[in-house]
């Protein structure tokens, strides 16, 4: 299975990047995870369409080709960072790679409450017109006090957090499989309906 992980920060040092890197290593035998950076994405501006910016085009293609997306978001002023919001606005504007794409929202924060409010906002955003993603319901992964949860090698050392991450990712992988199965069934149904509606179908 191929997943992509979006680092929801443009900071050089990010615990959300560390979290995705940890996932990339720990679960390497279960799925491939490519990390996607948003550092070079321009600020969203409708009057200056930059949908063809190289970074946006790469993000668009990587997301489209992935089976699912993990977004790791910080929390700034009770919401997601401006850089992440701007990236999602660009991707919803013309490119739209998130259509019917399974998404798992996670996050790490310096504060003990984790990124609970930012994750709530992000879940709402991902279901907006132009994005229309399938967000895994429930299964919040809120890594609070992240500076205390990683060792110097970037390994997650908090046993409870690891357990919750294991559970959440297992459910997300199942969620991805379910979405894929539904899409296959819808494709079969569409083909059957097309055949039924076409009076010439089956004629020799």
Image (spheres, helix red, strand yellow):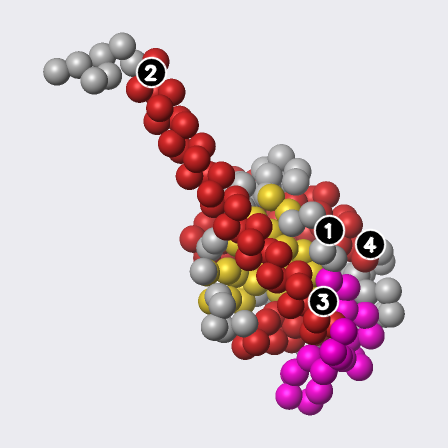
Image location of residue 115, percent across then percent down = 79, 61
Closer to the chain start, of discs 2 and 1, is 1
| Distance from the alpha carbon under mark 3 to that under mark 2 | 48 Å
Picture layout, residue 93 above or below residue 143: above
| Of marks 4 and 3, the one in the foreground | 3
Q: Are marks 4 and 3 in contact (CB under 8 Å)?
A: no
Q: Which residue is mark 4?
A: 117
Q: CB atoms at circles 4 and 1 under 8 Å apart?
A: no
Q: How much space separates mark 2 and mark 4, taking CA atoms?
A: 48 Å
Q: Main secondary structure of the magenta part?
A: loop
Quarter placement of the N terminus: bottom left
Q: Going 53% across and 51% down the picture, which residue do you hit?
A: 176
**Left or right, 32 with reference to 201:** right
- Residue ID at (34%, 13%): 197
- Confirm or deny contact between disc 2 and disc 1 (CB under 8 A): no
Magenta span covers which residues?
141-160
Q: Which residue is mark 2?
A: 196
Q: Which mark is residue 138?
A: 1
Q: Is the residue marked by circle 1 packed among few (<14), some (14-19), or many (20+) residues within 10 Å?
A: few
For label 3, the SS is: helix
């Amino acid at each position: 299975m191929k997943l992509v992980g979006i680092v929801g920060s443009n900071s050089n040092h990010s615990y959300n990047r560390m979290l995705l890197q940890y996932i990339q290593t720990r679960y390497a035998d279960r799925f491939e995870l490519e990390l996607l950076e948003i550092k070079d994405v321009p600020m969203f501006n409708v009057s200056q369409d930059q949908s063809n910016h190289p970074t946006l085009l790469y993000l668009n293609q990587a997301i489209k080709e992935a089976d699912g997306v993990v977004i790791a978001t910080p929390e700034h002023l009770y919401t997601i960072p401006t850089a992440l919001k701007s990236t999602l606005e660009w991707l919803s504007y013309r490119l739209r790679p998130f259509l019917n794409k399974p998404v798992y929202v996670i996050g790490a924060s310096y504060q003990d409450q984790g990124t609970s409010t930012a994750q709530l906002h992000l879940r709402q955003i991902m279901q907006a017109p132009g994005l229309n993603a399938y967000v895994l319901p429930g299964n919040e992964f809120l890594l609070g006090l992240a500076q205390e949860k990683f060792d110097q090698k970037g390994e997650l050392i908090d046993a409870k957090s690891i357990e919750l991450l294991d559970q959440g990712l297992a459910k997300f992988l199942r969620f991805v499989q379910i979405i894929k199965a539904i899409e296959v069934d819808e494709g079969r149904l569409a083909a059957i309906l097309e055949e039924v509606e076409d009076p010439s179908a089956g004629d020799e």
